[in-house]
Image (spheres, helix red, strand yellow):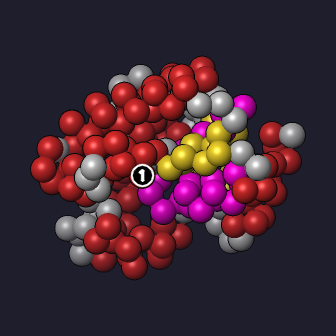
Amino acid sequence: MKIILIGYMGSGKSIVGLSLAHKLKISFIDLDNYISEKEQLSVSEIFKLRGEIYFRKKETFYLQEILNDVDNVIIATGGGTPCFGNNMELLKNKSETIYLKTSINSLVKRLIPNKQKRPLISHLYDEDLPEFIGKHLFERAPYYQQSEFIVATDGKSIQEIVDEIESILF
């Protein structure tokens, strides 16, 4: 079984994925970390040195690699992963997709403390984040909404989200 967690940056894909993988006793892969290991650069460095187009091409390449080579895994995608190329089709055809839906206000609260680690928002002032995130969510929602399942995350603990995903899948 392949379970893919989709959602905007800060929606909890990595921490929920890791917790769910631990509970189900299966592997966990954070796609951004996987790309960083393969490329020997952080995602921020890839964006800075090689640009977003290079990153998106590598993202699709490594996503296909994982989907073809790894079974029984939970994958936390990057926030933009489903929105580029044919990635969403790849994901829907080879896995169970779950959109972790999180409000703009919650995302802003989660992202401000770690903003410098996020190449798409590191240059923004805190007060500009709500508008930027809102615009991005509007653009990305058609992709995210294609997920097989949608789990709202606002006001829920990591454990509550993990339990909800488990109840949906099993």
- The residue located at (78%, 56%) in the rendering is 23
Question: How many numbered markers are drawn?
Answer: 1
Is residue 57 among what the camera can see?
Answer: yes
Residue toward you, 7 or 133? 7
Q: In this view, does 95 lie above or below 137?
A: above
- The residue located at (55%, 57%) in the rendering is 14
Q: Position of residue 89 (x, y in %)?
A: 51, 22
Res. 13 image quadrant = bottom right
Does 49 sit left or right of 139 as displayed?
Answer: left
Location of mark 1 (residue): 33
Q: Is mark 1 on a helix, strand or loop?
A: helix
Q: In this view, does 78 lie above or below 132?
A: above
Residue toward you, 150 or 33? 33
* Outermost residue to the left: 49
Does 79 sit left or right of 2 as displayed?
Answer: left
- The residue located at (53%, 40%) in the rendering is 144
Query: Which quarter shows the C terminus?
Result: top right
Q: Position of residue 94 (x, y in %)?
A: 61, 23
Is residue 137 among what the camera can see?
Answer: no
Residue 153 forms part of the magenta stretch: no
Res. 61 image quadrant = top left
- The residue located at (54%, 22%) in the rendering is 68
- Three-letter amino acid code at the position of disc 1: Asn
Q: Position of residue 85 (x, y in %)?
A: 36, 25
The stretch in magenta equals: 1-21
Does 60 sit left or right of 75 as displayed?
Answer: left
Query: Which quarter shows the N terminus?
Result: top right
Q: Position of residue 10 (x, y in %)?
A: 48, 62
Does 95 sit left or right of 79 as displayed?
Answer: right
Residue 7 forms part of the magenta stretch: yes
